[in-house]
Image (cartoon, helix red, strand yellow):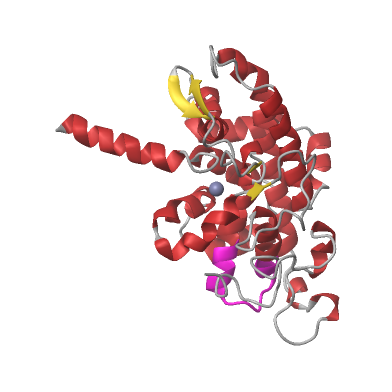
Amino acid sequence: MLRAIAGTVLSLSLTASALAWGADGHRIVGTIASAALTDQAAAEVRDLLGDETIADACTWADEVRNDRTYDWIKPLHYINVPRGATSVDGRRDAAKEGEIVSAIIRYRGVLKDRSRPKEERLLALRLIMHMVGDIHQPFHVSYKDDKGGNSLTVQSFGKKSNMHKVWDTDLIQARLKGVKGGWATLSADLRESITPEQRRQWGSVTDPVAWANESFAITRTLYRDAPNPKTGVDQAYYEHFRPVLEQRLEAAGVRLAVLLNDALGTPGASAKPEQGSGKGPAPATSPVQPAAPGKPAPSGGGGASGANPAGSGTP
Ligand SMILES: [Zn+2]
């Protein structure tokens, strides 16, 4: 009986952890970011989140996966790129139901817009905090035919896993092995290892398409350097990719802070309509045109059109 319960709990937690940078990855990204927020941005984050911690807000988008009300969020965790493509194309790869690139652009706009209702901006904050993490996980910028590596079964440290989960969870768990204090300690360690030059360099890239392209370049190498089928993902694989894993978490944390400082950092500044757009909802896209080349709303669907309030126009 106990074993049956334990089995259920275990399989539930496996299901939950198979979905995105595991919860720990998201907590690490949020915690790295939180230390770099301006006082103003930190105060606004606190005001929007209330009692919810930043670490918890970062995992919210995964926790609501079983709530059908939030089914529309599911496609926003990733972007699919055609086989054979060498880079992400914001317009070509835009999906009707939305994807991670246009979601970040859109909800960044919602967060900036202080005329929006607080609940909309809270939703935008939770989504941004999560998606900036996900877009730095290579297998979230990947191929549709193998579900972003979810159907690439592999032995990982002696257990059945898949390549998506390896990068979401397994490598982070390997990194956490023996770390006293778990993700909180690792967050602090990673944050302290970020050099000023890395902070400057990562922070200067604010276009989600560029973040996706960095991930996709890594994804392509991960397909080329796939684990040996005999040994699977083992200590050698982990050691080889550990610097990449750590830098993706660090870069995501730095960029999340830059985004939040920009969106929330200047009191009142973003209440002005951007680019003189006059009355009505401020287009979420106006400051970020380069991210979506050509037309701002690539497919008319989930894209970056600022005309719909967050979520309300989404199925
Ligand atoms: Zn996710």
Residue for point 77% across, 51% down: 209
Pick the front one: 82 or 156: 82
| Residue 166 percent location from the top left of the image | 54, 29
Position of 31 compared to 202: left or right?
left
Residue 296 covered by magenta stretch: no
Decide: is 22 above or below 127.
above
Q: Residue at x 75, y 45 (%)?
A: 211
- Compared to 125, does 249 lie above or below? above
Membership of 118 in magenta stretch? yes
Q: Is residue 137 left or right of residue 294?
A: left
Q: Which residues are magenta?
A: 109-124
Residue drawn at (55%, 58%) of the image: 126
Q: Is residue 20 visible?
A: yes
Query: What is the x, y in percent for residue 17?
Result: 45, 39
Question: As displayed, is residue 68 above or below residue 220?
Answer: below
Camera-nearest residue between 296 and 190 = 296
Q: Is residue 211 above or below residue 267?
A: above
Instruction: Tell me, yes or no, if residue 47 can be seen here.
Output: no
